[in-house]
Each structure stands twice: as structure tokens, then as C-alpha cells.
Image (cartoon, helix red, strand yellow):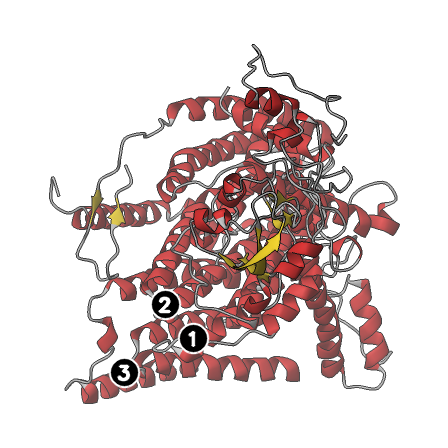
Amino acid sequence: MLFQDVVFWVLAIVAIGAALGVVVIRDLFRSALLLALVFIAVAGFFVLMSAEFLAVVQVLIYVGAISILFIFAVMLTSDVRRGNLPNRLQIPAVVLPALLLAAMVVTAVSTDWRLIPDSQQERVGLVQTQSVNVLSDSALEQAGVSSPEEMQEIQQAGIADLLISDFVLPFEVASVLLLAALIGALALARGREGT
Amino acid sequence: MYGLAMAKGLMVTLKNLTKKPTTVQYPEERVKQHPRFRGEEFVWYEERCTGCASCAKYCPLGIIKIVTSPSETAPKQGDKYRLEVFDIEIQRCMFCGLCVEACPYDCLFMGSGFEQGKYSRKDMVLHVEDLRQADKHPSTFFRPQLEASGYDPRGGRPLNWREVGRESWRWHQQEKSGLRLEHSPVDTAGSQQESN
Amino acid sequence: MNCQLAADNILFENALYRVIYDAVGSFLPCWLAYVAAGLAIMLILVNAVLLGAALVTWFERRLLGRFHNRIGPNRWGPFGLLQPIADLAKLMTKEDLIPAGADKITFSLVPLVMMAPLLLMTAVIPFSKNTALANLNVGVLFILAIGSLTTVAIFMAGWSSNNRYALFGAARAVAVLISYEVPVVISLLGVVMVAGSMSLANIVQAQAIPFLLVQPLALLIFLTGMSAELNRTPFDVAEAESEIIAGYHIEYSGIKFALIFAAETGAMLVVAATIATLFLSGWVGPFAEYIGWFWFLLKTLLVLFVFVWIRATYPRLRVDQIMALSWKFLLPLSLINLAATTLEVFFLRDSAGTLATIDLWIMAGINIPLALGCIFLFGNLVPENAKVLSVRPTTVVVPAVATVEVR
């Protein structure tokens, strides 16, 4: 456990330091790079919590795509050499996030976090050790789950299954929203006819 | 089929793997030059030279320097000058061969080598001593008598001053005496002073 | 001895790890033994990749020489084997310049950030049975994600050089990279579906016949896409040695340039290893328990040969042609491959979700004609744009740079 504690503290310091750097540092390009570092540190947290898939997806999407987006945006901004200019909003900018941080910390600490029930722990175990590839009845039977009630509990949903089965309409509507954003961006970037 | 041209290109490159490479490994082997190669190591025959300095006059870069003084050698032929300085600056020579074309006595020939590189600019001048001691394998550039005799500077023997001139060349003799033949004979076994 | 690795620990199956762990665990506390064993294997991997990158440069130069009908470097050492050392010595003795006005910290960090992803990628590749350092069950996704970290490094190099040509080259390189990530990821989805798992060791086990035959389109797309991501000819607009705009590493000299170059060549090596694992069935072969590593190296060498062969044959593409190839040719092909593979896997798999060998042959029989047919169809559908593109200067402040419209 000592090893994991050390890693946690190192990652925490790196993440918070980089996040502070994003908002404090003058040079815009460096703050974009520090944001990428924050994303990598968050991926490290996911690995610590044994959510490897989330960690890898975090790196792929956030660092591999969204950071590039930020960097392109920084590059295409015209006054980028002047960086983050000081202005009169500095006091509110410290006070309001501090209040928000306090509220979030209080909420996180005082909530009663329930771990997932044992049956779903078993599901996680079966999938992570790759004893089953498909959550069908016969595969579960081969993996040693005997009673139908257990099988049903195991097959019942985590977020992925819910997104595809019960919440598929909001899922698709979100992708329509993304499509609208894409069309809007294209329309803005196209320029006038004939130029 | 779309990718067939690309596949053919790949096959061409693959076939090159089976062929022998055409590299000549320089310090161990040298690329063979052709007989008319205008090389760096000028071949000068002192016995034929009269000091007329036509080569210096014709050189477009002015890199030949000739200083002569009167002398009484060969008084019957009309005197030759005594050559005191005969410098050819090969650092700026462009090996055009105009000096060889200019020489009326067939005493200056282009050489057949290319390895006169030196480490300092002062050494890049051929003085008269160097010219005297140079390797006598003249290139056949602008010298039809050498070419007609089939001389190959790459493998042939060194020539002396009696053999390189055009006066013994059969075509030249007939030309001088006004006798014109229909075609110019290429004389490989003609006069007794020819080289092989 | 007194420290036991937990059975569900990801490093449990790695025999070398357990040997070192047990040996060191007798006199060190357990967590330190854990770290020490990990570091020992990481050291082996890092050295292997760096030495491999040096050998790959030798291999590439000799092979390119033979393709060009000449000998490659043969002066240093027997067959020129010490040539990379000569290159390294030359680069180390060069002056280490940081251009004026450049961002010093970012500029100096770029070789590190370029080297790190490819060293991380070697952690999941199985060199033999049970020999991956970390047999992640999201191994394929890990490789894709870490490979996209190179994009940030290239941008850092271009921006921090304080040179508009470096920035221009970096922007081109990043555009090519992100365009080619899409077909590459989608083509690997097909492989994952057939194998039923994202873990590389499982994919090797699932290859009763090599996935070269079962997923030919995926192999073609992955090979092309990775060539583009590695900035290899014919896609190397970012570092074109014969163009004036010399790319994002123009300001680097000395050991920094050596590291960037080693990172590119090492990435080629790691990608070749990945292709050998995913498509050519990795360490499988006769006597694989004893010499599995030999088959793995042989297949990696074969893929490297193909990379160099392509480099020796094809001319460089223009940047708009590269984009057209990705979006108009590779992306539709990858989507067709995904659709076909989904249908085949859905209909052919049995109740436990696995595919038998005969199913793989059936899939091969469907997919190979499909691949040839699609290439023929798409090749004839994408027209060759021979007319001159209009060059229009915009008000974008990448200064003095004209953007070219892609039609």
C-alpha cells in the first residue's frame, strides 16, 4: 500500500501544480501544455483506481485530441504573444472558485459512497480476468456462475449497458447536438463565397 | 485494377536487390576514364616545346605563366627560347583543353588522372619541374594521331617525344603534300614510329 | 520468498518479473522489490528499444542502398555495423544550439516527450509466451492512446523553435497525424472484434490463422496509416529532406536531434512489432515455447523490410494528396471493413462468443475478395485532381503562410 500512497501523492501534487499553472502562467502555449499534463495526471488517477479502460480513453481523447484542439486554438489566436493579461477580475477569480472548491470538498467528504454490490463485483472480476467475453448465459455458466438469479444480476447493467439499452435516446440526441456544433463550425470557418 | 501499377513499382525495386551494386569503392578501385579524358596531370614534352607561349595566350582563364629568355638551342630550326618559368595553376583550371588545341608543336597534352588534390592553395600549381617529371600517358584529346593509332592511356605504355607528334602520321603527311585521298585511312600499322 | 505477488496482479504471469521479484524480495521490503523488479525490466526494454533504433537505422540505410543498386554504408565496422555509432559520435560533438527567442524549457523537453511514448508502447507487446511487461486487457487501446501523445510533442517542437517554417511543418505534421488516426482506430476495431479481446497476448492466442488473411483491409489501412503517422516516405511532408521548409526539427542540433531521430526510428520499430503481433501472429511458430522470440523478431524484421521497401519505391505525396488519401480512401475502406467484420462475427460466433478456426477461414474467404473489390472500386472513384489549386492568403496569424485549399 505504501507504493500506491506514494504514487497518489506524486500524482496529486503534479495535477494540482499543473492546474494552478494553467491559470496563473502568462504564456498561453505553456498553459495549454500544462493542461495536457493535468489530463495525463488524471489518467494516472484512473489507473490507481483500477479503471484502466477509462485511463486509456482519457489519454486518447483528452490528451490526443482535446489538447491538440486547445493548442490549435492558441496558435490561431492573434494576440497570443501578449499572453494572459492582468485585469481587474483577479479578486473575484480567487474568491468564487475557492467557494466552489469548498462546496465540492464538503459534498465529497460527507457523502455516503456505496461500493457496487457483490454480484456486480463478481461481474467486474469475471470481465477483468477475461474469463468471459460475452455476458451470455452459457459463457457465464462455463465461468462457474450457477444460479439464474446470479446470472441475471451479473448481466444487469453498468453504465455502458444502460447507455445502449435504457438511455439510448439521450445518447443519440447528444450526438445530434455534436453534429449541430460541427455544422456551425464549418459554416463559421467557410468564409465568403468567391474569396 | 487500381493498385497494379503500384505493385509493379514494388517489383522493380525488389528486382534491384538481386542485381549487383554498381558502386566503385574509391580508394581501392578507381572508375576507369575514357581515352579522351581531359585530366589534371598535364603531359608536357620539353624536347618539342619551343617556348612560343601559344598555350598561355589561348588560356581563357590566364592561369599559364611562361617566362622565357633567348637562347641558342636548335639554331638550324630557327631557335627555341629557354624556358625559365612554366606554371599551370590547376586550382583554377577548368580543363577546357584550349591550351592543348593551341599548341602547334604537339608538346602539351591533357593527362589521364584526376587525383591532384592538395591540402593548401600554394601547392595547387604545377611548376616546370613537376611537368618534366609527370607521368607520360597523354590523353588522346584533340590528338587524332594518337587516336588513330589506337593508343589507350589507361593501359598503354608511356610515350616519348618522338612518338606523339603528328608529323609521322600518314594522313597528316598526305595532307601536307597535297595528296588527298577519298577517305582518311585509320592507320594502325602505318609508319615505323607509331605506338601500339 | 517472504513476499508473494497477488494472483490477480497483472505482472503475475511474467516469469522474468517473478524471478527478479523473488530474488530481490528476500532482502528488500515488498514494495521496494516490486519497484526494483519493474525497473529492471524497464531498463532491459529501454535499452532494447534504443539499440534496436540504432540497428534499424543501419538496416534501413543498407537496404535502401541495395534497393538503389548501390552499397549502403560499409566503412565502419564489418558491413558498416558501427555506422550508427559513428553517427552518434558526430551528433554528440556538435554544438547544442537553442535559438534566440525560443522557449527554452519546452525546446529542451521535446526530445524527452518524443521518446517517452514509444518506450511506453513496448510495455504491452508480447515478445514470447507470457513475456509482455504488462498484459493490459486494453492493450490495443493503450498503444493507440500513447501513439497520439507524439502529436503534442511535434507541436511543442514546432512552436518552441520560434521559426515560422518549423511551425508550418509542425502544423502540417499534426494535421496528417490526426487525419490518419481515424481510419487506423477503426481498422483495429475489426481485429479486436475477431479476437474478442483488446489484450495483445489474447490476440496472439486467437490467431489460429494470421489476421493478415482474415482482415486484409485492416492490415492495409493500419500499415498505410502508421506510415503516415511515423512521417515515413511517401508521407513525409513534415520532414522532407529535399524541401526548403525542413520541418519541425529544423532548429535542433546535436544530441537533441539524435534523440528525435532515434524516437522516430524507434517508433518505426515499435510499430513494426505491433503489426507483427496483431496481424502476423506474433511469437507463434514451430517450437514457439523455446524460440518464440526468434519468430517474433523475424516477423518484425519482415515488416521493417516492407517499410523500407515502400520508402525506396514511391515518391513523396503532396500534403493535399495525403489528406485526400486519408479521408476519401482509407476512411470509407475502414468503415466497410468494420461493417463486414461486425456482420461476420455476429453470424459466425458460437454461444460462448468465440470463433473457431473454420470460422476464421470463412471470414478470410469473404474478406480477401472484399478487400480487392473495394480497393478497385475506391481507387477508380477518387479522381486525380490535375488542375491547379487556388492559393489564397488568409488573415490567420501564422505569419507569411498561405493556406492551400483542399478540393
Is residue B66 or residue C209 the one in the foreground? B66
**Where C320 sits versus B188, above or below?**
below
Specify the amino acid type for callout 2: Trp
Tell me if label 2 and label 3 are in contact, CB under 8 Å: no
In this rendering, would C340 be left or right of B19?
Answer: left
Closer mark to the observer between disc 2 and disc 3: 2
Q: Residues within 10 Å of mark 2 (few under 14, many from 20)?
A: many
Residues indicated by labels 2 and 3 sit on the same polypeptide chain: no
User: How far apart, in angstroms, are the residues tagged by discs 2 and 3?
Assistant: 31 Å
* Residue at 65% over, 22% down: B170
Q: How far apart are marks 2 and 1 (CA)?
A: 9 Å
Which residue bears the numbered disc 2?
Answer: C159
For disc 1, the marked residue is: C106
Where C204 falls versus C116 (above or below)? above
In the rendered view, does B122 fall on the left or right side of A193? right
Identified by mark 1, the residue type is: Thr
Residue behind mark 3: A97
Query: From mark 1 to mark 3, how far is it between C-alphas?
Result: 29 Å
Q: Which residue lies furthest to the top in this view?
A: B182
| Residue C1 place in picture, x, y as percent | 87, 78
Query: Helix, strand or loop at disc 1?
Result: helix
User: In this view of the protein, which residue sits in the foreground, C369 or B66?
Assistant: B66
Which of disc 1 and disc 2 is earlier in sequence? 1
Chain designation of label 2: C
